[in-house]
Amino acid sequence: MAETVSSPTLMVSRFFTWWGGELAALVPAALRQMLGRGPQLRVLEFSSEDIRFADYRGNQVRELGRLTLAELEDDLNPAAGQAMRLSSKVAKTAILLPSKQALYKLLTLPIMAAGDLHDALAFQIERQTPFSPDDVYFDYRVRERDTEAKRVSIELVVAPRTAVERAVNTARRLGFDPSTVGVGDINGGDPLAFNLLPRELANRRRNFRPLLGLV
């Protein structure tokens, strides 16, 4: 009985395997290679005037092009359409904000505050920055714990909500779905070591209309 049921299934499976191979053979070799080799990370680096698109593969960076914010205002602009096409084969996308749109601080807190760092840092933002916690997104990482002195050293990055949301909305308008929002040239370290993208923004449904328009 089992053999009778599985035989047609096996035949259908073999047919689709053959059919897929025949279709793949019709695609030029260079295009097959490109489609099968997605970038490790695509980065959209924002400035006050333009967006720089680049692929990050380990320590190698390959620039793909730039799009001025003035060009982005025109939905029919060829440059905007080219930027949209860059989103068609991306494993992960990250946004880099300019460093002047963010604030980096090194804080030292009592080690007892490490139990609820988020609330403790929200209090520090109001005390040590010109921002209110409700007006910013922030991220942090523990740099050092001194158990003898009972102190913990925290690296804190803060950016206005408007700047983060504007960049994320622009990226989504171009068809990208960013998973990270970092800050370029932040304290000479890894710009993607911090992620300012909050959960409520990351979980919003992606807008596929730009991609469908290109198709």
Image (cartoon, grey):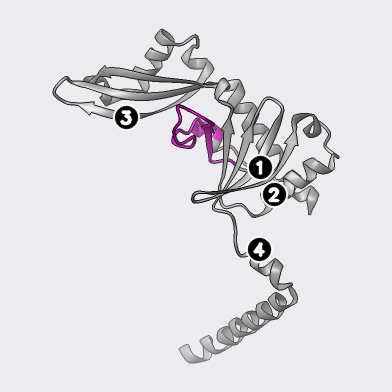
| Mark earlier in primary sequence (3, 4) | 4
For label 1, the crowd category at 10 Å Cα-Cα, with few meaning under 14, some 14 to 19 and many 20 or more, is many
The amino acid at mark 2 is Leu
198 part of magenta stretch: yes
Whether pointer 2 and pointer 1 mark residues with C-beta atoms closer than 8 Å, the reply is yes
In the image, what residue occupies the spot 65% across and 27% down?
Answer: 166
Q: Which residue is mark 2?
A: 86
Q: Which residue is mark 1?
A: 53
The amino acid at mark 1 is Phe
Q: Which residue is mark 4?
A: 34
42 part of magenta stretch: no
| Mark earlier in primary sequence (3, 2) | 2
Secondary structure type for disc 1: strand
| Mark earlier in primary sequence (1, 4) | 4
Give the magenta part as a residue range: 178-201
Q: Considering the image in quadrants, where does the C terminus appear? A: bottom right
Residue closer to the observer: 65 or 41: 65
For label 2, the crowd category at 10 Å Cα-Cα, with few meaning under 14, some 14 to 19 and many 20 or more, is some
Quarter-of-image position of residue 112: top left
